[in-house]
Amino acid sequence: MRPTTKVARLDAIRQALNRHRVNSQQQLSALLAEQGIEVTQATLSRDLDDLHATKLRYADGSMAYWIPATTDQQAMEAAAAEGPEVEGENKTDAYLAKILTGLITSVARARNLLVVRTPAGAAQYAASALDRQPINGILGTIAGDDTILIIAADDESASSRADWLMTIVSGQEDAKAR
């Protein structure tokens, strides 16, 4: 459920662009409609401008919307160079491994909750990186100074995401438990 505010709509757009290769405003409008968000083409155009969305050309020649603020310049260039294979979890894993390696010191699970420990002062930065990525099974995070609470959709998602998180921050090539 989402409120009918502009902030909520922008967040829905950001998530849609992170999860899907969106080639047109019509396709984006349909994705938003699936979530119960009706938007005019003019509003959608303004929202994309507010988010600094641009179209990125992939190696296969197709173009899709991209929000540069959701990742860094090197990841954006990698997506353009590698083409369609760099989307979804692969892009997310690479980005999060770059950001979180060295920041996460432990992960503990309690049912559908993950308690993630970081060095002092790093929790909010790490939680922000997690929140900005499309991660199936994770509803959101709450961060303190050195602890992040990750709320998963269910116990199974929490278990698989705990393993996945430890895999990507350990620098292992095959990020399991997708």
Image: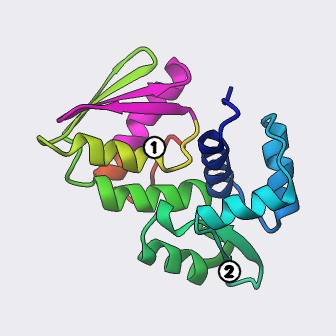
Select label 1 or label 2 by which is in front.
Answer: 1
Question: Who comes first in sequence, dot 1 or dot 2?
Answer: 2
Q: How many marks?
A: 2
Kind of residue sitting beneath label 2: Tyr
Task: Judge left or right: residue 118 versus residue 33.
Answer: left
Per the image, is 138 magenta? yes
Give the spatial CA distance, label 1 vs label 2: 25 Å
Q: Which is nearer the eye, 95 or 18? A: 18
Give the residue furthest to the left: 120
**Which residue does the image show at 44% across and 76% down from the upper left?**
73
**Looking at the rendering, in which quadrant would you find the C terminus?**
top right
Q: Residue furthest top?
A: 111
Q: Nearer the viewer, residue 151 or 70?
A: 70
Magenta region, residue range: 137-166
Kindly identify which residue carries mark 2: 58
Q: Quadrant of residue 66?
A: bottom right
Judging by the rendered image, the residue that carries numbered circle 1 is 131
Left or right: residue 82 compared with residue 103: right
Numbered disc 2: secondary structure: loop
The picture quadrant where one finds residue 137 is top right
- Label 1's element? helix
